Image (cartoon, helix red, strand yellow):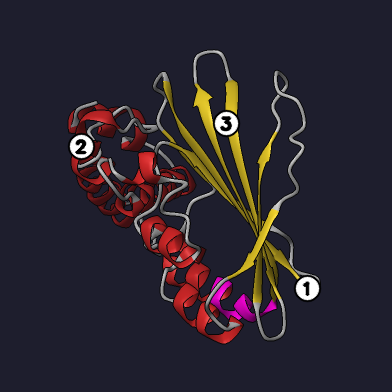
């Protein structure tokens, strides 16, 4: 989509609320674009699709055009503040009781999973216990081996401090690259009290700080195929 086509379809003679919705969508697309890590951070111009069917770098121009149109129509521009989402996650970080990480191989075209790896991190008062096991798929039998158990060499306080610096509150709900075959990941944050479980996952794509997250949770080997790209 060209800038002229964008103006014609989304801005010209549109009411203020409609233009605000366009800006909101654009800013979410931009934040998603900026959050990507690994090889896709370099190649994303060629691979990342978005709701506006545009080169991702054109989204910045589209946002500027939309903001100017909003102001011309008498509206006020209020940018999305991702810092609030990050601060919200960090404020409740010490209330996390368990972190569950799943790694699967996935064939996109037929939605087929295989080679599930499953880790649970139990965050106790003075230690972090780790359970690791393979999950059976429909074509596999339940493994005879019990989950492997060990501890992370960090206190919960040290662990939470490192987690705070990763801006996990700014991660998007889902990162997706619609190609044939690749690695699918899922992270669940469970809390001791009333907070709702936070789930983030993706297929091939991942946020910038995901490598640091894998390093902290000793997941580099499990996600080696994903992280090397």
Q: Residue furthest top?
A: 110
Main SS of the magenta segment?
helix
The residue at 56%/71% (across/down) is 152
Q: Position of residue 187 (x, y in %)?
A: 58, 52
Residue 205 highlighted magenta (yes or no):
no
Q: Residue furthest front?
A: 145
Residue closer to the observer: 35 or 155? 155
Using a 10 Å C-alpha cutoff, classify the residue at mark 1 as few (fewer than 14 neighbours), some (14 to 19) or many (20 or more): few
Q: Position of residue 181 (x, y in %)?
A: 43, 22
Q: Which residue is mark 3?
A: 115
The residue at 20%/42% (across/down) is 57
Judge left or right: residue 91 versus residue 5: right
User: What segment carries the magenta color?
Assistant: 89-95
Q: CA distance from mark 1 to mark 2?
A: 40 Å
Q: Which residue is mark 1?
A: 192
Going from N to C along the chain, the mark reached first, 1 or 3, is 3
User: Which label sits in the foreground, 2 or 3?
Assistant: 3
Q: Which residue is mark 2?
A: 43
């Amino acid at each position: 989509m060209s800038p002229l086509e964008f103006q014609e379809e989304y801005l010209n003679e549109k009411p203020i609320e409609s233009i605000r919705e366009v800006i909101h969508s654009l800013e979410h697309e931009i934040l998603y674009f900026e959050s990507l890590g690994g090889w896709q951070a370099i190649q994303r111009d060629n691979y990342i699709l978005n709701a506006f069917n545009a080169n991702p770098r054109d989204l910045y121009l589209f946002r500027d055009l939309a903001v100017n149109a909003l102001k011309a129509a008498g509206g006020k521009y209020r940018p999305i503040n991702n810092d609030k989402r990050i601060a919200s996650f960090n404020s409740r970080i010490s209330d996390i009781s368990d972190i569950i990480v799943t790694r699967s191989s996935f064939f996109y075209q037929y939605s087929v999973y295989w080679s599930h790896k499953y880790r649970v991190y139990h965050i106790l008062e003075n230690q972090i216990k780790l359970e690791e096991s393979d999950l059976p798929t429909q074509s596999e039998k339940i493994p005879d081996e019990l989950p492997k158990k060990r501890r992370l060499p960090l206190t919960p306080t040290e662990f939470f401090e490192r987690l705070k610096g990763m801006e996990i509150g700014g991660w998007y709900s889902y990162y997706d690259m619609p190609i044939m075959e690749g690695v699918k990941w899922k992270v669940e944050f469970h809390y001791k009290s009333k907070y709702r479980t936070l789930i983030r996952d993706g297929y091939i794509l991942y946020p910038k700080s995901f490598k640091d997250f894998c390093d902290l949770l000793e997941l580099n080997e499990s996600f080696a195929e994903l992280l090397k790209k």
